[in-house]
Image (tube, grey):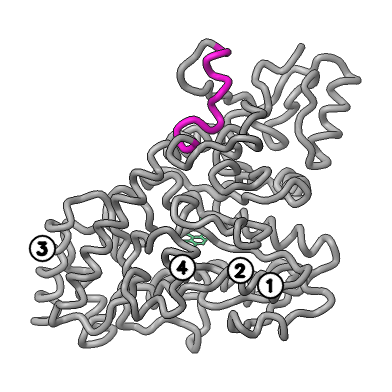
Amino acid sequence: MTSAVPLRTTTATADAPHRTDTAAVHAGRRDLRQLGVHVPPLEMSTTNPLPCVERGGASYEALAGGGLPPGDGSHVYQRLWNPTTARFEEAVAELEGCAQAVAFSSGMAAITACLLAARSCGKGHVVGVRPLYGGTDHVLASGLLGTEVSWARPERVAEALRPDTGLVIVETPGNPTLELVDIAAVADRCGDVPLLVDNTFATPVLQRPAEHGATLVVHSATKYLGGHGDVLAGVVATDEEWATRLRPVRALTGGVLHPLAGYLLHRGVQTLPLRVRHQSASARRLATWLTGHPAVERVYYPGLPQCDPAGLVGRQMSGPGAVVAFTVRGGGAAAAATADACELITHAVSLGGVDTLIQHPASLTHRPVTPDARPDAAVLRLSVGLEDPADLCEDLDRALRAAGRA
Ligand SMILES: *Cc1c(COP(=O)(O)O)cnc(C)c1O
């Protein structure tokens, strides 16, 4: 038996990569015409017939070691390999300009795999640049995975490195107040230590960290890549060496992505550039409008000049993104009341979907962060969706006034 679905659907991408919008639509799909279908097959098998003991065994060995399935073998077992998920991985790798990508059951599973892979090379020390996503901060601070963390400002990363440092972890724009970090400058300070950049907020449409020196580019694919609030997933785009190291961690810890989730993510990626650009344009309008609102104290948005002192938008990022944070006059109580009073905008954690969400980071997403590193209680975070921004402004205005009266 030969494998019905080729592993890489194209060999031409490294030589002639397509532009982002074209890659989003076609990456991971270039063999479909040859297969006689228009959309990717959804392959749900948990186990796969083995051509014979010898070739089955060779396939198992290749996959368990983190390699790619041999062409004349079998995918063996879904925890080792799934062709539908592999198509999504191929699309993410192409969009991020990386050799390969490895998908996981969640963003946290992806970050966990990176930490375990570094640790298994004898490098259990991690340098973390705050602010980070609450879950990432928590897993590092707790030492749950046997890693030890040193927190450092971006300009102090070199001083924090040790001989056993396995990773430097950065998020930009940062969560929740959207501070930008100069990726190339931090990569320089990392020396030989791999730099992991969480690119969830920017997406490869706005920022491609590998071009600035990142070795590992991580996404909570739950957010913009999926884009519709119905898939939990993570993905790491990286070089072949790291991908080969991550796949066995995924197989052994079992944090694999279900193929239906891989299918939905691959479909979501097709509209990613369109969604991100449209949502960013609306976010810019909302950020400007909020700046002039009497109930709003301060607005955090990388598109506002005071929020981007180093001029990274235009240089590192092609646009400021679609998440806006702001502080409400009246502190934590007024911020919480504003989130509660929204009607069109859903009061919920998460971000990056087609509909607008608002949440209170100090109570929710950043609750596990130690109090001294936790965001101000007056901060609200808004993930701007595809609604008409005029309707969003009306809803926010009503909510801010209601909170002011309470
Ligand atoms: C949501 C999120 C994560 C965690 O991803 P899950 O898919 O929820 O596990 C990591 N980083 C950032 C920036 C996030 O927003």
Ligand 1 has an atom within 8 Å of the beta carbon of the residue at disc 2: no
Pick the quarter of the image with the N terminus: top right
Q: Position of residue 180 (x, y in %)?
A: 47, 73
Q: Which residue is mark 1?
A: 188
Ligand 1 has an atom within 8 Å of the beta carbon of the residue at disc 3: no
Q: Mark 1 Cα within 10 Å, few/some/many (few <14, many 20+)?
A: some
Q: Position of residue 364 (x, y in %)?
A: 40, 70
Residue at 40%, 76% in the rendered image: 308
Q: Which residues are magenta?
A: 23-35
Q: Are marks 2 and 4 in contact (CB under 8 Å)?
A: no
Magenta stretch: includes residue 25: yes
Left or right, 110 with reference to 378: right
Q: Position of residue 207 (x, y in %)?
A: 49, 57
Q: Amino acid at mark 3?
A: Glu
Between residues 167 and 334, which one lies in front from this camera angle? 167
Q: Amino acid at mark 2?
A: Ala
Q: Mark 4 or mark 3, which is nearer to you?
A: 4
- Mark before the other along the chain sequence, 4 or 3: 4
Mark 1 secondary-structure assignment: helix
Mark 3 secondary-structure assignment: helix
Q: Which residue is mark 2?
A: 184
Residue at 62%, 54% in the rendered image: 110
Q: Amino acid at mark 1?
A: Asp
Whether 264 is drawn above or below 73: the answer is below
Left or right, 178 with reference to 23: left
Mark 2 secondary-structure assignment: helix
Whether 397 is drawn above or below 265: the answer is below
Q: Are marks 2 and 1 in contact (CB under 8 Å)?
A: yes
Q: Which residue is mark 3?
A: 394
Q: Mark 3 Cα within 10 Å, few/some/many (few <14, many 20+)?
A: few
Q: Which residue is mark 4?
A: 173
- Mark before the other along the chain sequence, 1 or 4: 4
